[in-house]
Image (tube, rainbow, N blue to C red):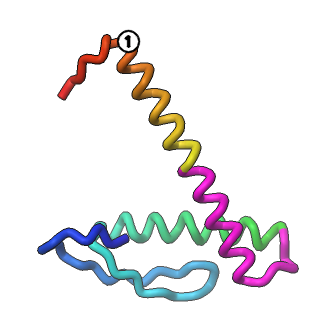
């Protein structure tokens, strides 16, 4: 959450993830921190609902793996879209 930007305002945001309250510090806007926490909470709750025998640590690790897999796919799609755009524009950049 903390982008380590000098002079950036540090927000302290209370979030609840899988029934536990945390205070998160970061330079991201409060709304973003809340949304990210909701994603983690939702993922952990989905896993816990299908595997009630798992302890919190395993649920957290599986949630991290699921979210990392999502990120991996999104990055792959992004790179493919950039390559397609570059191919279609002949390498010209719009910036």
18, 85: nearer the viewer: 85
Residue in the image at 23% along x and 23% along y: 93
- If the image is split into quadrants, where does the C terminus sit? top left
- If the image is split into quadrants, where does the N terminus sit? bottom left
Q: In this view, does 14 lie to the left or right of 41?
A: left
- Pinpoint residue 26: horizontal percent, then vertical percent: 32, 75
Q: What element carries label 1?
A: helix
Residue in the image at 84% along x and 71% along y: 51
State yes or no: residue 9 in magenta: no
Residue in the image at 31% along x and 13% along y: 89
Q: What stretch is highlighted in magenta?
A: 51-71
State yes or no: residue 57 in magenta: yes
85, 29: nearer the viewer: 85
Number of numbered discs: 1
Residue in the image at 53% along x and 68% along y: 38
What secondary structure is the magenta-colored segment mainly?
helix
* Vertical order, 16 against 68 (above or below): below
**Residue sitting farthest toward the right:** 53
- Pinpoint residue 70: horizontal percent, then vertical percent: 59, 50
* Vertical order, 23 against 92 (above or below): below
- Pinpoint residue 15: horizontal percent, then vertical percent: 47, 80
- Pinpoint residue 88: horizontal percent, then vertical percent: 38, 12
* Vertical order, 3 against 90 (above or below): below
Name the residue beneath numbered marker 1: 88
**Residue sitting farthest toward the left:** 7
**Residue sitting farthest toward the front:** 91
């Amino acid at each position: 959450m903390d982008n380590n930007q000098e002079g950036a305002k540090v927000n302290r945001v209370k979030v609840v993830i899988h029934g536990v309250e945390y205070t998160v510090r970061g330079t991201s806007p409060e709304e973003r921190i809340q949304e990210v926490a909701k994603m983690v909470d939702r993922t952990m709750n989905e896993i816990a609902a299908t595997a009630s025998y798992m302890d919190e640590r395993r649920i957290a690790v599986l949630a991290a793996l699921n979210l990392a897999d999502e990120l991996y796919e999104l990055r792959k799609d992004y790179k493919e879209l950039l390559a397609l755009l570059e191919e279609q524009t002949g390498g010209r950049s719009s910036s």
